[in-house]
Structures are given as C-alpha cells and as structure tokens.
Amino acid sequence: MRRIDAKIITSKVKEMCMKANYELSNDVLDKIKQSIDKEESPIGKDILEKLILNANIAKKERVPICQDTGMAVFFVDIGQDVFVEGGNLTEAINEGVRQGYTEGYLRKSVVKDPFLRENTKDNTPAIIHYNIVEGDKIKIRFAPKGFGSENMGGLKMLKPSDGIEGVKQFVIDVVRKAGPNPCPPVVVGVGIGGTMEKACLLAKKALLRNVGKFNEKKHIKQLELELLQEINKLGIGPQGLGGRTTALGVNVEVFPTHIAGLPVAVNLNCHVARHIEVQI
C-alpha cells in the first residue's frame, strides 16, 4: 500500500487551479492558429488572432485568460493500492482550490445556495468525480468551468429508433441555439449512452480530451468528424460574428445503455477550453 500525504494533493491542486487559468493549453492554441488560415471571414480571422494575443498576455502576466475562472470540476482516478494520510481526500482537494483561487487572485464564483446566492468566497466546494482503478497512483484531472458555456449545454433522451441521425441533429441543434453565448469557437463534448446522469457525465469528461485527439473507436471518430464539419457550416463563427470557425473540435464519449433508450448530452466549452492533469 502506497501512502500519499494529503498536503501533497493540496499543493498540486493549488498549482493546477492557477496554471489552468493562466495558460491556455497547447492543443487549443494550436487549433486556433490552424483555424486562422481556414477562416474566410476577415472579422473572424481578426478575432482568432486576438484570442491568441489574449492567451499570450495572460501567460506572460500571470493573469486569468478569462474573467470567469469557473467552478472547479475534478475527475479523480484513485489507485486501489493508495492510502491518503494526514487528512481527508475531498477536503485536501477543496483546500487546494481554496488556496489556488485566493493566492492566484482568481474570481470566486460559487454561491452556497442556488436561491439565497451568498458567495462562499473561496470557490469551494469543488465538483469531484471519483473513480477507483488499479495501481498505486492518483490521477487528478481539472477543468475550471465557466458558466457562459456551461449554461448552453443540453440533454435529450432519444429513442433507439432515432439512431445516429437523431443524435447528430440534437447536437447540432444545441450548438445552433447556443449561438454566440458560449463564446465560440467552442469545443463540443458529447456523451452518448448509459443513463440520464451518465450521459451528462460523459459529455463533461469528453472535454478533458485534447482537441484534435479523436475517439479510438472508428465509428465514433467518424461521428466526431461529421459533427465538426456540420457545426462549422452553421456560420456562427468566432464570438458569434460570422465565419467558419464555430467549433475547434467535437469530442464524443460513449457507454453501454438500456435496450429502450439512447441518452445524449452536450456540454460546451468556450475557446478557453481549460483542462489540466497531474499524476501523483
């Protein structure tokens, strides 16, 4: 049994919170750069160039890429041969969020109650999804989620007879209705299968995959390519001002489901598609 001090987890999470909000990951930056050459709209091309400039300034000056530094969402894979000592794992993660958002001068966006709306003032509690795996390590994946894009997601319980065309139509409809609100170009996370809540979780998890890295299943990769092509025909464009670059990528995750159902969920990320991971 390998032992990991809770303080190490807190320290790593603190660093992740600041780095993810200061530095746009290379996969997203590269896709934006590639999109400039393909973008036909002069305004769209100019906006894409401004997004890169903004990301470079944020990294250099150590300031957030976006004013919405998000609700802290974690996916944690815990090896079954790991023992966390010196504290509770969930509290260790929350303490890392508390320190990262405070010391990094990141906006605290979480309220204690959805109706009373009193700010918790430290961006906790985090949303944490745990998964037990083999081994003696802990992998922590973090995605600060701004709600300009989060609010534009969708879920639909399709019938099996709706098939892949029904799935495609729903995903495209969600992006079309979102329009400029999620700050395009977006990254589209799609979860298909499982149950209602599992599909939503898959859609969120899909956003952790690097843009441009396709699903290993051939038919799902084909679906990702077709969806990206169709979404970029919508004409929404960068920041919703028209153009071909509405989405940088479409990531689809699937899971076994019931014979009577075909759940589909869509979770959108804005162009600040933040995601980072560490292994301890």
Image (cartoon, helix red, strand yellow):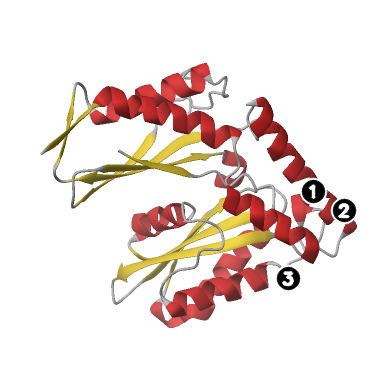
Residue tagged 1: 49
Q: Position of residue 219 (x, y in %)?
A: 45, 80
Residue at the spot x=78%, y=66% of the render?
Answer: 38
In the displayed structure image, the side of residue 25 where residue 184 appears, left or right: right
What is the spatial separation of the Cα atoms under label 2 and label 1, in whole angstroms? 10 Å
| Residue 108 vertical position relative to residue 158 in the rendered view, above or below | above
Residue tagged 2: 43
Instruction: Name the kind of residue labelled 1 in the image.
Output: Glu
First in sequence, mark 3 or 1: give its number.
1
Residue tagged 3: 233
Q: Are marks 3 and 2 in contact (CB under 8 Å)?
A: no
Q: Position of residue 2 (x, y in %)?
A: 15, 37
**Dividing the image into 4 quarters, which one contains the C terminus?**
top left
Residue at the spot x=61%, y=52% of the render?
Answer: 28
Residue at the spot x=64%, y=26% of the render?
Answer: 63
Residue at the spot x=48%, y=31% of the render?
Answer: 17
